[in-house]
Image: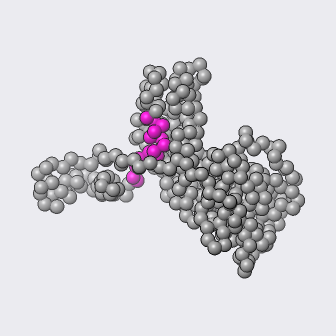
Amino acid sequence: MVVKSVEAQRQQFSAARVERSKVAAPEPLLAQTLAEPATPDSAFAGAKKKLVNMTGRRKAVALPVNTALPSVSAGQLRGSPTALEAALRGPSRGGAQPATLQFKGEVAQAQAAGGAAKAPLAPAITDFLKTAVAVDDAGARADFKKLDKAMKACDWKTAAGLARTSFEHSKDDARTGALDGSVGLEPARTVQQQLDFLASMDGAGVTANYPPTRDQLKAYFKTLSDDPKAARAAFESYTKAFHVHPAVANNDPTAGVEYGRDSIGALPPKSWADVEKRDADPAGKHLAKHLNDCEGYALMAQELMGAAGFTFKEHLTANGGPAGAHAMVAFTHDKEPGKFTVTSNDGAFSEKNLKSAADKGFLYAGGKTTKGTSYYAGDTMRGSQLNAGAKSHAIK
């Protein structure tokens, strides 16, 4: 399949690996008119030699009974369907909205009409909290119980503050010792990062699950449509908190994700469901994160940056890099005339020149830029990859 570039981690991929070339003077030129070559010759096709070891599959978790459901007496249950429906609806006076029922398996959950459902926490987070509230140190245990309560209530702002109190003690603090020995400092930092992002969604008035859904994320990014700088920062915050490149998770610069294949070769992800299929680590420092390589990040960027008011320009593919070809996405924004934004893995870069922004993105992903480095444009991710194979439609 297509092999994509490495998600940059400064401590793992030092600047010494990258040759930073000088970028040409700013000149806002767009890509040529895009068309897929008649004879596909994708550099991505067949590049992936093996599937990624997909660890940490979700385990089945029973859905909790919604305690908000009104009680129904045995007499009402024996009565007519109309009586049962009336009991479930509850009082109708005072403008109260009737409850609607959603069925998952055999469990009915009540939800106010038009409201946002609160799904259970990710299984990895549920396990994390079970460990946290069982630590030996009494002070730590009390802190973690408060955190557990706030997280189960989906009160992300409160939970983020409690997590900071619980996780960010000095090494001399007994609670840190309890955390490090039982829960782990690295998983705790991941949870802190995730809660901080969810608290930002809360602050924008967007109800969020853990992890947030596609629709919730798009609603949040829509609130940033007048602030492209904030939208770029939010994209980086979200992807760093809830996703990880397999090259980082597996400590293997050549690792990638297999999204699918056809007769030509590797396929990029087709929908948001494709970027949520692979759990990175159910217990370690990447808990509650999904595995994705540059193609998965590119799909997320097109959805989320589009919701934030960015105009999609083209997909970009660069040949080379630690793992072969690399996928990125280029955008513009009405609030930033004459500037381009390019997303690359979990990074977002803005420059007055499209190639300059692409160079930054490629360097960030562990690639090396030279005078001969080219980025091939396409109106779809696959089209860009095919153009890279054919070496056509290079941006200037």
Front in this rendered view, residue 246 or 142: 246
- Asked whether residue 127 is drawn in magenta, I would say yes
For residue 393, side relative to residue 93 (left or right): right
Residue in the image at 58% along x and 32% along y: 185
Q: Position of residue 8 (x, y in %)?
A: 71, 47
The image quadrant that residue 103 belongs to is bottom left
User: Is the residue 54 above or below the residue 260 in the image?
Assistant: above
User: Is the residue 41 above or below the residue 186 in the image?
Assistant: below
The image quadrant that residue 319 belongs to is bottom right
Query: In this picture, which residue range is highlighted in magenta?
Result: 116-130
User: Is the residue 379 above or below the residue 68 in the image?
Assistant: below
Front in this rendered view, residue 250 or 83: 250
Q: Position of residue 173 (x, y in %)?
A: 56, 20
Residue in the image at 75% along x and 44% along y: 13
Q: Is residue 31 visible?
A: no
Q: Position of residue 359 (x, y in %)?
A: 79, 56
Extreme residue in the bottom direction: 38
Residue in the image at 21% along x and 47% along y: 71
For residue 20, side relative to residue 136 (left or right): right
Say which quadrant the C terminus sits in: bottom right
Front in this rendered view, residue 43 or 99: 43
Q: How many marks are shown on the rendered structure? A: 0
Residue in the image at 52% along x and 43% along y: 282
Q: Is residue 270 visible?
A: yes
Front in this rendered view, residue 206 or 79: 79
